[in-house]
Amino acid sequence: MKFIFRPVPFLAFALMSSSFVRSFAGVSAGSVGADQLRDLRSDLLESFPKPRVNWQMFIILPKKPDMDGLKLEIVAGKTVSRDACNTAAFDADLVRKEIPDTHHVYYELNQENPKIVGTLMGCKEPAIKKYTPSKPHFVELNRSYPIVVYVPKSFTVKYRLWSPQKTYSEASAISGP
């Protein structure tokens, strides 16, 4: 099955433990998305843990009516100064965690200070500031629950939507002896 990237309207925003606009379980919305937070059941948000010290909580709320087969690719990263010719990524994964006695799931970066890994070509170009992501994590969308991601405050969360083609492609068979 091939997946094709198609932009779809989504709402994502960070919930920072330091700003208080509308509070849910000690976690609050920044200036963006407070109206959408009111639409969520407060008991749903209360079931998620508060961000640790120097961490933040990001929420992604699906806004697409037909989400069958859609997947969300999520990365955590930050803009760092690095050379322009090498590819690089943070050596960190988003780990799936379950809240006991609920169906709620959240994702957390598995390291607080991950190292950057990448190719080591010699570059003549000067260093540039560039967004450097973690390893991508794919999540199946569920319109009943928001997607919650915890990362250190120095990181941001980015995502893109993947949708399957309408038809299946035929695979080629190779017969054995």
Image (cartoon, rainbow, N blue to C red):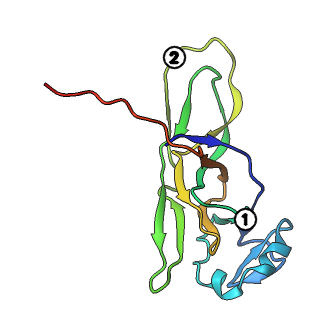
The total number of labels drawn is 2
Q: Is residue 99 left or right of residue 158?
A: left
Which is more toward the observer, 134 or 39?
Answer: 39
Given residues 81 and 143, the one toward you in this image is 143
Residue furthest to the left? 177
Horizontal and vertical percent for residue 33?
Answer: 82, 68
Residue at mark 2: 121
Determine which residue is flagged by label 1.
Answer: 65
At 63% across and 11% down in the image, what residue appears?
A: 124
Q: Position of residue 140 (x, y in %)?
A: 54, 60
Q: At 72% across and 68% down in the image, what residue appears?
A: 16
Q: Quadrant of residue 78?
A: top right
In the image, taking residue 37 as reference, residue 95 lies left or right, namely: left
Q: Which amino acid does the dot numbered 1 rest on?
A: Pro
Q: Earlier in the sequence, mark 2 or mark 1?
A: 1
For numbered disc 2, what is the local secondary structure?
loop
Per the model, the C-alpha gap separating discs 2 and 1 is 45 Å
* Mark 2 and mark 1 residues within 8 Å of each other at the beta carbon: no
Q: What residue is shown at x 67% (from left), y 85% (from top)?
A: 25
102 relative to 71, above or below: below
Pinpoint residue 10: horizontal percent, then vertical percent: 75, 58
Name the residue: 54% across, 14% down. Answer: 122
